[in-house]
Image (cartoon, coloured by chain):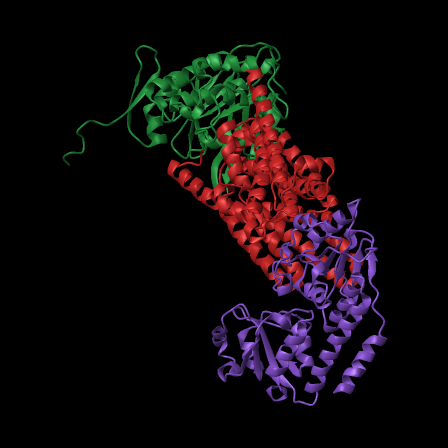
Chain colours: A green, B red, C purple
Amino acid sequence: MTAAREPGAAGPAGAGAGAPPGPMIEMRGASFAYGRREALEDVSLAARAGEFVGLVGPNGAGKSTLVRLAAGLLAPSRGEVRLAGLDPHRAPRRAVARVCALVPQEPRVTWSFTVRETVMMGRAPHQGLLAIPGPFDHGAVRGALEACDLVALADRRVDALSGGERRRVFFARALAQEPRVLLLDEPTAFLDLGHQVAAMRLAQVAARGGLCVVAVLHDLNLAAAACDRLVVLSRGRVVAEGPPAEVVTAERVREVWEVPVWRGENGATGAPVVLPALRPGAGRDR
Amino acid sequence: MIHSRRCRLVLALAAGAGAVAAAVALSCALGSQPISIPAALAGREPDHAILLHLRLPRAVLAALVGLALAGAGTALQALLRNPLAEPFVLGVSGGAALGGTLVLLAAAGASRLAGPAAGWIGGASLVAGGAVAGATASTVLVFGLGRIGGRLVPEAALLVGVVFNAFAAGVITLLKMLVPPEQAARLLYWLMGSIGYEATGTLAVGAFLVTGSIGSLVALSGRLNLLALGDEEAAALGVDVRRERALVFFAASAATGAAVALAGMVGFVGLIVPHLVRRVVGPDHRLLLPASALFGAAFLVLADAAARLAFLPLGTEPPVGALTAFLGGPFFLWLLRRSTRAGEASP
Amino acid sequence: MRLVALLALAATAAVPAPEVGRVASADDLRPSGRGASEGGAVWVGDPPAAPPRRVVALAPSLTDVVVALGQAGRLVGVTRYDDAPEVARVARVGGFLDPNPEAVLALDPDLVLWVTDGGALPAIRKLAELGQARRARPFPILAIPVIGVADVYAAARIVGGALGDAAAGQRLAAELSAAVERVRARAAPLPRRKVLLVVGREPLVVAGPGSFPDALLRIAGGVNAVGGERPWPVWPLEEAVAADPDLVLDAAVNEPADGISRLAAIPAVARGRVARLRNDDALRPGPRMIRGLEEILAAVHPEAAR
């Protein structure tokens, strides 16, 4: 199932006409093991177009594995994975890449391309062998650069940018793919607060534009503030799912992250907020 | 935007072609015998024969070998995401030399049994075929063994390549003892890498293989940009990583096999040239690969001319592989220092 | 003694000159395994119509033949290994394994003499191709495989014929043959001595069966300590010690004489039974082999030396 191309579309391409009903990502009983180590067990979930889903959980819970399963980079040892109706592992990579874009955790910067060239690489699934850009490609790249506020940096070399700027570049590359599904693996890691918020805003805008956005997030508060829905993973299993207000409770956090917290609400937005039970000066005298 | 990229491509290719032409012209003009080019072109002997039948084919041979090695080196660097990769260092040349040696050995053995009629076994096409097969086998080996935890690790692959090279050289040295003394001298020149005087038929086979394989690599150069990002990212961008990587491997092996069949193990061309060209042309392989190949051709033609002239007073010619190793060894060490100092392998 | 020489002379005179074959193109030029005395010599291109005036010799042994025929004046090019005083002024065209086609072409030769050998084959093929392609004055290559002693006689005859003086070639062949037979006759009644002929010391490279010095050794009444099939084997020192030759011939003429003491594990060396060859005459399959042969005879059978 290929995305319906809307000529001259600026910004993240919407699902538009021809969007399939039903979830964009669907997993039923999916499991995956690295050798003998079970990373994911019996995971079932669904994510729809226009949703911003946050995947949260402690380290090693299997969040990155889940994202890779969804993208078709891994094959489930059991169960089923569907991406926009395709089996992402079996389907031709080109077809999958036209529908789904993945922004990895630490994209490697080996050779020094410019921002524009990097974002243009996102058009690869729509281009021929020699990747000669056509008018649609230029339009998509322009839209992605605008959406990520990169127009001023377009001709700078990527390895000369700061970490936050670089993240935006790879986000723009994913947007240039004109996908229906956007998978983000820890988009806020190592970023300062300002850039974290900016990244979350971009994800939200993409979801508003009709994409199905799934992001692996380690900051529970940020996830609770920005996402429409949260999926909590622990030791390879889904232990909770739903709107942040329901999912983020003190008991749940203590159970999954094994840490006592105070849970409150953001007065301005109503989003849940958790704070660890730490006090300055604690532990000094025993 | 469009104009600038196309302009850059045209400019790079024109500069490369110009460099090759200039190098070939220089190589034809210089040599052990002073000749006059106008007289040669007018048909005066021996100038005519020396220019057109000795120096020109030799320069063309050097250009083909340089084209192949620089192109293969660029592709291998993209695949391994490491500027230290090139056919010689990765053991691909060693495998090619081993493959070709085995064919020559078979030819020698068959001649002994079946008489001179079986000499065709040692003919150009079969030796080239043996070299390509050897190159492919060693590529498979190096990239298969250079994995840690299922992932291709460039440093591991380089190590395996270096060791395999030593292995191949050792086997060839052993085989050298089994062949008649006159073949042994030839094997030695092969081991060192030298541009000689090959028959037109051999040149034709070589040209066919080289242009075919480098042409394939140029066609795949857009993919190389994506593969250089990493396996997962390339896959996420729609590249069938396994298949494309195999195609690039095979093309690079074929190019290396052809180069080794023509001139033996000439090393470091695929290391020095792409690195220098990348600094000028940039990392886009659609520009870099053809430009590297062309400048590699020019480089080797000039190196061969330099090798010939430097030893003129001694009345002999050193193998060009010795000169490229002389230049390339320190260059490799300098690159190594730079990359380890930078912490990450990026030019 | 004279009788033997006369018989030898008669014998060689009665033998017809061996056939020199022809090959159509340079691509067919390759070692056939047959020596010159068995018809292994070939012309690439047409033999010169008139006696050639500008001859290039690509092997020192062939230079020696030309010089021995008294035709040194016709040589215009020799290898850089040539040390005959008669050719001291002649241009050098490269080495034995790496002749320089450019240099040969520049000398405008009308005949190129070559010892058939696999090492320089590609360069020679190229030269043959060019020699035939040259419209105005094509030149042929005469490829002579000189492997054994009989091939040296054949070479003398063939080169003599090529230079247009077949009679001189026959005479030279007869002289060489007679000299060799003389040595053979002197050595015949003497006891066989086991000899090891050393060409390289580290690693120990010796002349084995099938090599040229081995043939000379046998003529001079020696028995080669080295067995097997390889003409120039790299021999383990232990085998040399176990073989216990009566005499060690030191033919490593480019290395200092006292270096042979490094092989002192061999009893003969320890006992001082080492004879050093003065030069490489015994290793060159050409007219100089006579001098080398006599030297070997003197070393192996000092009692026969007079």
Q: Position of residue C26 (x, y in %)?
A: 77, 52
In the image, residue A283 sits, relative to residue C291, either above or below, namely: above
Instruction: Identify which residue is drawn at 63% across, 55% down.
Output: C92
User: Front-most of C80 and A243?
Assistant: C80
Residue A220 x, y percent position in the rendering = 36, 23
Q: x and y percent of residue C33 in the render?
A: 75, 65
Q: Is residue B160 placed above or below C218 in the rendered structure?
A: above
- The percent coordinates of residue B219 (x first, y second) are 64, 30
- The residue furthest left is A285
Specify whether residue A226 is in view.
yes
Along the line of sight, which residue is nearer the eye, B59 or A183?
B59
* Quadrant of the image containing the C terminus of chain C: bottom right
Task: Please count the marks in the image.
Answer: 0
Q: In which image quadrant can residue A194 be found?
A: top left
Image vertical order of residue B10 relative to residue C58, above or below: above
Judged left or right of residue B305, residue A66 is left
At 72% from the left edge and 63% from the top edge, which residue is drawn?
C71
Of C294 and B135, the residue lying toward us: C294
Residue B144 in sight from this viewpoint: no
Q: Quadrant of the N terminus of chain C?
A: bottom right
* Residue at (55% x, 73% y) in the render: C236
